[in-house]
Amino acid sequence: MEPAISIIIASKGRYEGLQRLFGSLKALQDRAAIRPEILVVNNADDGAPEYRLAEMVNALNQEIGGVRCLRDARIPPPRPKCQGQNLAIRAATGSILAFIDDDVEVVPDWLAAIKNFFRQHSYDAMQGAILMPPAVQADQNFLRVWNRYRTIPYINYGEQVMEIFTLTGPNMAIRREIFDRVGLFDERLGPGRSGMSEDVEFAQRMLSSGKRIGYEPAAAVYHEADWDRLNEEFFRKWHEQQGRSRLLYKNTSILSIVPNLSRSLLSYGWYSLFYKERKRYRALGRYYHYLAMFRQKFRSGDLTATKIV
């Protein structure tokens, strides 16, 4: 039996990105044969943004059918991404749930690749490739700046299906039954709450329960090349959010945070001395990460050594 696929998109109302994404969904090969349902969670603010997003979804439904707009009015702004995704999971009818962000465009055979992946492999979840748009793939200025900050999540593990051990949210698909077994996304995490790591935390729960994740290069998306993410301020906030997010679900001990914080600062100084830019920024990111953990521990007053990771 062919898997039924539900496509889930949680959007805060990035309208230009949504227009590009919707255009790529309309161009999907085998869409008419596979007949996916598309669930767009309207997490835009109340008022004009909310109605504009709803109108875009309704227009897409009139054109291709099978598209629904979901919104939980009981949740006050800012509406967290995970709550929207969990709302869609409960409403979805597919046996395969495919998650994409509203700042990506899918390649024409993305949907068929997901169907074939789960038909041909026993993996419980799929990570698709997340690629740079063709317009910047040879742009040396963009490549130089992205390589410094790495704050746009491009994922390319090669040209073969392979087992991996994490998930990256802008392009992933999961068997519906997995949510019944390991639970939904942790609503303390992700955009609108801690900022990120809801995908990583879910992957860790999957792996801990004996489930497996596979990488499918053919199920690719192009992620927007957002220059606003490639600067010092965004880099700092990115790693601070990562640190606070991972503290929530790892409950890292202060006995682990302090040496990691010291080590990252020493590494940053060492690589700055020899001007190893990529290693220097990797060390700086770890410094921001552990400094945010350290500060959060003091704010909460929880300095007990409950868990060392």
Image: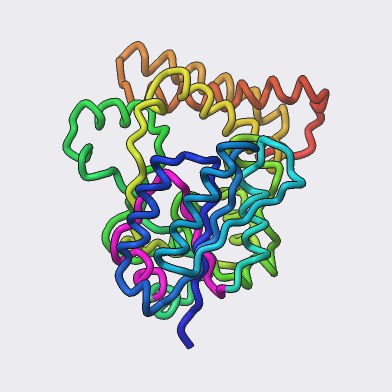
In this view, the residue farthest toward the bottom is: 1
Q: Residue at x 35, y 56 (%)?
A: 106
What quarter of the picture does the C terminus occupy? Answer: top right
Q: Quadrant of residue 181?
A: bottom right
Q: Quadrant of residue 140?
A: top left
Q: Up-down: is 46 above or below 280? A: below
158 vs 209, left or right, is left
Q: Up-down: is 295 above or below 243? A: above
Confirm whether residue 165 shows in the render.
no
User: Whole-percent x and y of residue 163?
Assistant: 43, 63
Q: Residue at x 77, y 46 (%)?
A: 74
Q: Residue at x 40, y 69 (%)?
A: 114
Q: Nearer the viewer, residue 227 or 167?
A: 227
Total numbered circles = 0
User: Whole-percent x and y of residue 285?
Assistant: 48, 25
126 vs 301, left or right, is left
The stretch in magenta equals 94-115
User: Whole-percent x and y of residue 25?
Assistant: 37, 60
Q: Residue at x 72, y 33 (%)?
A: 253
259 vs 136, left or right, is right
User: Whole-percent x and y of residue 297?
Assistant: 74, 25
Q: Nearer the viewer, residue 85 or 243?
A: 85
Q: Is residue 40 magenta?
A: no
| Rendered image coloring scheme | rainbow
